[in-house]
Image: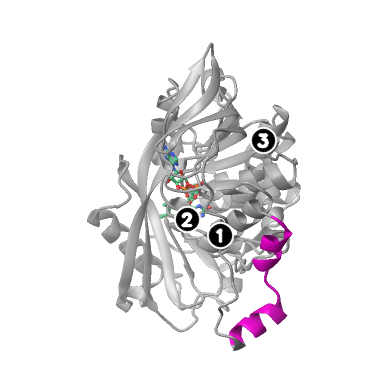
Amino acid sequence: MGSKGRAMGRFSGFRLFKEGLTGNRGWSPHWRDAEPRSDYDIVIVGGGGHGLATAYHLAETYGARRVALLEKGWIGGGNVGRNTTIVRANYLLPSNQRFYDLSLRLWERMEQDLNYNVMMSQRGVLNLCHSDGQRDAFIRRGNAIRLSGADAVFVTPQEMKKDWPFFDYENARFPIKGGLLQPRGGTARHDAVAWGYARAASDRGVDIIQNCDVTGFDIQRGRVRAVETTRGRIAANKVGVAVAGNTSRVMEMAGLRMPIESHVLQAFVSEGLKPILPGVVTFGVGHFYVSQSDKGGLVYGGDLDGYNSYAQRGNLPMVEHVAAAGVSLMPMIARARMLRSWGGIMDMTMDGSPIIDRTPVDGLYLNGGWCYGGFKAIPGSGLVFAHLLATDAPHPVATGLRLDRFRRGHMIDEGGRGPVPNLQ
Ligand SMILES: Cc1cc2nc3c(=O)[nH]c(=O)nc-3n(C[C@H](O)[C@H](O)[C@H](O)COP(=O)(O)OP(=O)(O)OC[C@H]3O[C@@H](n4cnc5c(N)ncnc54)[C@H](O)[C@@H]3O)c2cc1C
């Protein structure tokens, strides 16, 4: 898009004021609805957060020009618009932490980089612990986080009571022994992230092609030549796959079996309440996490539904399980009504950590395995996947996120649970 289109889509205080007075008729679409061309240098499959951020960085950071992003549905229809929007960088293992630390730093400048209000709100992420052993493990993790250069503070129950007076601190089964707080963690508005990256990528010449389902790969002598789509064959020198919950299905079309299972994860929103939650909190025993949106709804979630599925909806037993965990932590939310729930398909690897790597097929690259942690990874993943696609070398912070680590035994088993995807 030329400079005119770029100027048309930009926001400023003056522009908002002017459009407010003139009926908001001067805004143009945020991104071009591009028609597919017959060939590109790089094709990205999947228009979620990871695909969009990758396309943006290919154009902005690595100067790639002939780039297309193919999305089978619409931008924002996948997990990027279905998550509970928690952003953090509080991992124990270096292979994860250095990647998520980069990602959090990119979150902190995203609004300036994209000129888009993604409502990034660093209201803090507090992980609660409920036993002496869990407290020791949290303190160890906090020290590792601080050594990595990120922030972590251990908070005692007494210190917590000022901001969080309504926790059930003395619960006989799950007494609160403290919490690990990351003040720089928080939340962001999920679909704004998709729209911001889509607009920025389109402005820089990326063709964003919606309603374009990739149905196969043309692979000749071990090298990818093109993708087959519902809108025709599109040739490409390189293809980057970033399809989250559909990773196994798409990679199977290239003849590759993935160390990934797909699971359903649900999210829930309550009726609007007065401001009660100052930040994000996670319950350390029942797998419950919650924050409060700017409209007042409690946005919360819990465990995976526990069975493999490609359906973007969950089942009632998990609704009950998550609600019970929430009430164990904060009995006073028992009377709040749940208004909405939905599900997303999660791509869970055998060790629960992501993959950003080349594949055994030349010219075919993989970005996947994000499971329930991939929203916070979006800016970092976009940068390092673009680096890999542009240079053919892994980005320094992603050298551990290899596809063959399962074969070599170099797992990144953050939870220490072994190769059991539904427990990660
Ligand atoms: C309920 C829920 C809560 C979550 N909460 C959090 C959280 O609080 N914090 C956090 O960090 N993460 C969270 N996550 C995880 C996070 O949302 C995902 O890991 C991340 O969004 C996945 O990457 P993506 O945005 O690229 O995926 P998606 O948005 O799913 O993008 C993949 C895209 O690929 C497209 N696609 C699939 N197959 C094809 C094909 N054949 N051809 C073309 N396109 C195709 C899909 O239509 C989809 O749009 C949550 C997820 C869910 C479901």
Q: Amino acid at mark 2?
A: Gly
> Which color mode does the image show?
one colour
Give whichever of 30, 95 is nearer the camera: 30
Give the residue number, with chain letter if any, for mark 3.
398
Name which of mark 3 and mark 2 comes first in the sequence. 2
Magenta-colored span: 2-20
Is the CB of the residue bearing disc 2 within 8 angstroms of ligand 1?
A: yes
Q: Is residue 410 above or below residue 82?
A: above
- Quadrant placement of the N terminus: bottom right
Q: Dot 1: few (<14), some (14–19), or many (≥20) neighbours within 10 Å?
A: many
Q: Report the label total.
A: 3
Q: Amino acid at mark 3?
A: Ala
Give the residue number, with chain letter if any, for mark 2.
76
| Apparent side of residue 180 relative to residue 294 in the rendered image (left or right) | right
Q: Is residue 47 visible?
A: yes
Q: Dot 2: few (<14), some (14–19), or many (≥20) neighbours within 10 Å?
A: many
- The x, y position of residue 119, in whole percent, is 60, 69
- The x, y position of residue 356, in whole percent, is 59, 34
Q: What kind of secondary structure does the magenta stretch mostly adopt? A: helix
Location of residue 54 by image quarter: top right
Front tag of 3 and 2: 2
Q: Amino acid at mark 1?
A: Trp
Residue under the image location 69 percent in, 27 percent down: 392
* Mark 1 vs mark 3, CA separation in Å: 26 Å
- The x, y position of residue 274, in whole percent, is 46, 84
Give the residue number, with chain letter if any, for mark 1.
195
* Mark 2 vs mark 1, CA separation in Å: 8 Å
Name which of mark 1 and mark 3 comes first in the sequence. 1
Task: Name the secondary structure under disc 3.
Answer: helix
Q: Determine whether label 2 and label 1 are within 8 Å by CB.
A: yes
- Was residue 14 drawn as part of the magenta stretch in this picture? yes
Location of residue 237 by image quarter: top right
